Amino acid sequence: MVYMDQYAPYKIIEYGGTGEIVEKKSRFIADVQAVYTEEEANAFIEAIKKRYWDARHHCYAYVLGEQGQTLRFSDDGEPSGTAGRPILEVLTGSGIRNLALVVTRYFGGTLLGTGGLVRAYTQAAQAGIAACQTVLMRYGHELTVETDYNGIGKLQYLLGQRGIPIGESTYTDQVTIVCRVPFEEKDGLLKEITEVTAGTARVQVSDPFYYKSKSTREEAGSG
């Protein structure tokens, strides 16, 4: 179905991180931060350059947009194709969006060669990603469900079976709960809510949007 491709889950950075590798005495320091515009990405890159002002290279890549629509990278003086593109490939392979990653290199005196540079920048970028905390973003709806006290237990059980957490709950003469459901599960869930409450529950469905689903720890080189 079209929506599964167009609105596939993706990840964003919840907490940025820093990773480092050493290759033949050259230090490669990878800093990662969430960014949502090119202005934010460029500001982050400039901040890293100032932090490591005495380093030889500050190579970077960033990915912006829910579908990764904007991609940029730079070799910053390294041989063409040996730094920025390998970093970008790590980012796109990770499934993370709206982030910038800068790998700063302190030259150790030994030339690494083209293949060595590609491996070093790839491994440094992977180390940076591994040091981050990420959040899974899902495309879906917010449901506001109102039911009586006889139906709430059945709804709680249904949502628990589906692994859908309940957000805000309000108890008056009726019970109102709020939950978020992935786009592709919405129709099936609405049918089951009707079944378990014998059609007595009232459900308001929001327009679809991306929402934070859960935190996850990235493995180096995942994707």
Image: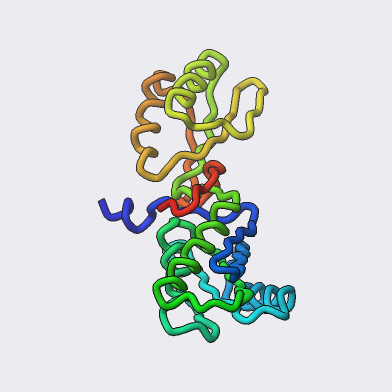
Residue nearest the viewer, comparing 2 with 143: 2
Residue extending furthest toward the top? 150
Give the farthest residue toward the bottom: 77
* Towards the viewer: 21 or 207: 21
Q: Residue furthest left?
A: 1
Q: Where residue 185 sits in the image (x, y, percent)?
A: 37, 38
Q: Is residue 176 above or below residue 49?
A: above
Q: Where's residue 159, x and y in %?
A: 47, 26
Tag count in the figure? Answer: 0
Picture coordinates of residue 36 (x, y %)? Answer: 58, 67
Which residue lies at the image location 39% right of the left edge and 39% below the top edge? Answer: 186
Determine whether 185 is above or below 87 in the image. Answer: above
Q: How is the image coloured?
A: rainbow
Residue occupying image coordinates x 54% and y 41%: 214
Residue at figure coordinates x 45%, y 54% from the top left = 221
> Who's the residue at 58% across and 55% down the image?
13
Q: Quadrant of residue 192?
A: top left
In this rendered view, identify the residue nearer to me: 64 or 128: 128
Residue 200 percent across, percent down from the top left: 45, 22
